[in-house]
Amino acid sequence: MNNLQIGRCGELLLQYKLLKLGIESSQMKTGSGIDLVAYSSRSRKAYTVQVKTNENPVPSGENGKMALGWWVPDDCPADLVAFVDLSSTSVWLFSTGEISKYSQKKYRGRNHFYFYVDPTANINSHQLSHQTHFEDFLVEKRAQVFF
């Protein structure tokens, strides 16, 4: 798949998961950094979503352990950011304010959010850096917070 197809798969996977939870969403084609709009009937609020997608984990640069990573600009226009791993069909959902809080690196106006998926990776105890640290951010749990 090319990058556009990978990104589209991520958007569709998020929409599928939201719809299974009874949450309506619609794709945006504006190129403005907003990929989806999802509506909460409970709060009567529409949330804009930027979707970042990986096809597979890759070896990390630091130790070669398998990891997933996404870059998000500081000035992300969306209310929420969804991180998607197509290989596991997992989606994590964060508010844009949480991105800066949980990102491990910042570089030239962008936040690098990543975590290891390899269970043998040495985990830095003062920084959240393993997939298991972010289980509460899976869309199935986070949808209850936002929608």
Image (cartoon, grey):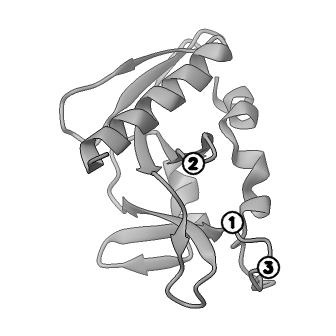
Secondary structure under tag 2 reads loop
Mark 2 surroundings: few (<14), some (14-19) or many (≥20) residues within 10 A = few
Residue 126 at x, y percent in the picture: 77, 83
Tell me which corner region of the image, top left, top right, bottom left or bottom right, holds residue 119: bottom right
Quarter of the image that includes the N terminus: top left
Q: Which mark is residue 117?
A: 1
Which element is circle 1 on? loop
Residue 61 vs residue 43, the one in the foreground: 61
**In the depicted structure, whether residue 66 falls above or below residue 36:** below
The quadrant of the rendering that contains the C terminus is: top right
Q: Which residue is mark 3?
A: 120
Question: Which numbered disc flags the more N-terminal residue, 2 or 1?
Answer: 2
Residue 49 visible somewhere in the drawing: no
Q: Nearer the viewer, residue 44 or 129?
A: 129
Real-space CA distance between mark 3 and mark 1, rounded to the nearest whole angstrom: 9 Å
Q: Of circles 2 and 1, which is in front?
A: 2
